Image (cartoon, rainbow, N blue to C red):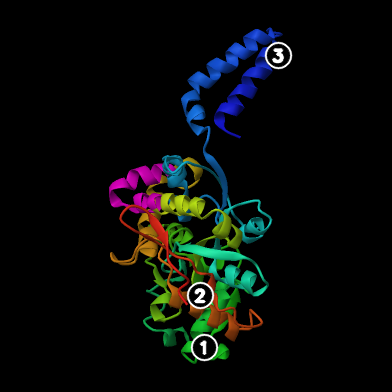
Amino acid sequence: MHRLEKFQIFLAKILVRQKIPRLCLIAASILAAFFSGGCGKKADKGLEHLTYRLKWLFNISVVGDLYTDVHGIFAEQGLRVTIKEGGPERDAIKELELDHAQFGVASADQVIRAVSKGSPVVVIAQLFQANPLQWIYRPQKICIEAPEDLKGKTIGITYGGNDETIMRALLSKYKIMNNEVRFFSVRYDYTLFYEGEVDLWPIYQNAEGVVIAEKLRKAGEEVSFFNPDAFGIRFVSNSVITTQRMLKERPGTIQKFISALLQGWREALDPGNKEKSVATIHQFDRDTPIKIIRQQLEATRMLMKPSPEIQIGRIDVEAWKQTERIMLEQKLISGPVSVERILRPYIKSRSNFIMLPNPE
């Protein structure tokens, strides 16, 4: 419900309690529309309505998504997009299948699992070029310069989670036996990491990684991050998805949506818009201090655009293929899905975004 609608309901309740005539109620509603941005409501008329279900809660990892909406970039493309938070109880793929949303965000393993079961989802953009899922550790206590340095260490993993899949793929690649490391089942409580009982703890480097690092630095301790991506384990994280039906029936809508979304991400990550982006996130994430959000934004930029030549939204086809291979090796899917057939990248032409053919 929009703020205007809420304000009108609030006014109506007051006027009814005061037994003010219906004519006054209508007049008050008109005034409310005027003072609450009635012109915006009028401009909203005729926009194409869409729903976009995220994978994350509203935090720094969705800064570009929120920026695109808050700063009117969707509206410039003739779209009114309802952005819905993600979380453990939300499944963007299922909502696309049920037509409760037209676009969503999912990690590659979610997409590959769904496609292996016949889901009609397709991938139209890849947000994170480097996976934010990494392991935080204290360099004063342990030295990790290569995967072999993990031997004898206590490594936190979430059994059944992406971090377990990634870590087991890394150990396999470097022929490190499971009995050469100690696994610790992690929860949301970081106490055992703070107390030094666990050497490496899985975190999202651009979100809680920044928060934990700040706490430890205040206590006089430094932190480092172990990044499997740097050692050849390219397991794709969040990507933008839609359905084969949308691709067939509403290609123009997809073009407008992805054009707006990627423009929003580019602007949100532009250093010149730093404070604007921080303020955008702080509207939705009041619990995180501005100082921390600034640090999180810098970390997010490096994950979204690790080098200047990489375009935001680029689909790393080889990384997707590797993700599928890892899942096959660990028997997380029953057979190959030929993931490249559902990757439908867009590139920016001189005047607009165009879809490339399947990168098969």
> Which numbered mark, 1 or 3, is in the foreground of this view?
3
- Residue type pointed to by label 3: Val
Q: Earlier in the sequence, mark 2 or mark 1?
A: 1
Q: Position of residue 198 (x, y in %)?
A: 53, 74
Q: Quadrant of residue 157?
A: bottom right
Q: Are marks 1 and 3 in contact (CB under 8 Å)?
A: no
| In the depicted structure, whether residue 279 falls above or below residue 316 | above
Q: CA distance from mark 2 to mark 1?
A: 24 Å
Q: Which residue is mark 1?
A: 172
Region rendered in magenta: 263-280
Residue at position x 52%, y 79% in the image: 167
| In the depicted structure, whether residue 129 falls above or below residue 148 | above
Residue 84 visible somewhere in the drawing: no
Secondary structure category for the residue under label 2: helix
Name the mark on residue 340.
2
- Residue type pointed to by label 1: Ser
Count neighbours of disc 1 (C-alpha within 10 A) and say few if under 14, some if 14 to 19, many if 20 or more.
few
What quarter of the picture does the N terminus occupy? Answer: top right
- Residue type pointed to by label 2: Glu
Q: Position of residue 351 (x, y in %)?
A: 33, 52
Secondary structure category for the residue under label 1: helix
Secondary structure category for the residue under label 3: helix
In the rendered image, residue 264 lying in the magenta stretch gets the answer yes
Residue 343 visible somewhere in the drawing: yes
Q: Earlier in the sequence, mark 3 or mark 2?
A: 3
Name the mark on residue 16.
3
What secondary structure is the stretch in magenta mostly built from? helix
Q: Position of residue 199 (x, y in %)?
A: 49, 75
> Which numbered mark, 2 or 1, is in the foreground of this view?
2
